[in-house]
Image (cartoon, rainbow, N blue to C red):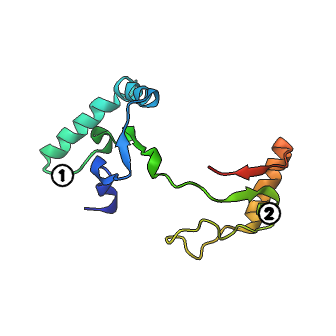
Amino acid sequence: MSHVEKYKVASAYTDMHHIDSDENSKIKSIYERNIWKLKSKFIEYRNYLQAVNKKDEIAWLNSIQYLAYKTDSLPIPENTIYLDELSKGTYTSLNVDEINAGKYNNPETDAKYIRKLKLSYNIRIKCQFN
């Protein structure tokens, strides 16, 4: 099974669960009633896979789109980010995970983003990322 295939099954998402919400109702409505007939296309595709003896999961038929994180499992951010500090490159190695270790943010790019923010919104604020 490929890395992608394992995430086409809802049980692979241990930190998530199905919730009933207005957003999910809207997604379900779009999925079930749209001009492209997505739901029927996915069912046809599943039937085709079965006919050719190919075992593949179809994420949309497994209701992956209705999953949401359990709110108590989300980490609470602890970083206060200041725009002026970000523009100086202070946070280049902040929040770099194991996969991207050594691939830090580019200070010049961060500075450009901040200039755009300040120009667009004419702001000097303390940003708290949540």
Please state the horizontal and vertical placement of residue 22, each as a whole percent of the image: 45, 26
Closer to the N terminus: mark 2 or mark 1?
Answer: 1
Please tell me which residue lies in front, 81 or 38.
81
Q: Secondary structure at mark 1?
A: loop
Residue receiving disc 2: 85
Which image quarter: residue 110? bottom right
Residue 55, label in figure: 1
Q: Residues within 10 Å of mark 2 (few under 14, many from 20)?
A: few
* Disc on res. 47: none
> Depth check: 118 or 37 in front?
118
**69 is higher (above) or lower (below) than 92:** above
Which of the two discs, 2 and 1, sits closer to the camera? 2
Q: Residue at x 49, y 52 (%)?
A: 74
Q: Residues within 10 Å of mark 1 (few under 14, many from 20)?
A: few
Position of residue 52 relative to residue 84, above or below, is above
Which residue lies at the image location 65% right of the left edge and 71% below the top edge? 93
Task: Name the amino acid, label 2.
Answer: Glu
Cα separation between marks 2 and 1: 52 Å
**Could you say which is closer to the camera, residue 50 or residue 123?**
123
Based on the displayed image, in which of its 4 quarters is residue 84 positioned?
bottom right
Which one is nearer the viewer's eye here, 115 or 123? 123
Percent coordinates x, y for residue 13 in the rendering: 34, 52
**Rendered location of residue 86, percent (x, y):** 76, 62
Label 2 SS: helix
Please, is residue 19 above or below residue 126 in the view? Answer: above
Q: Residue at x 28, y 38 (%)?
A: 61
Residue at image point 18% right, 39% down? 47
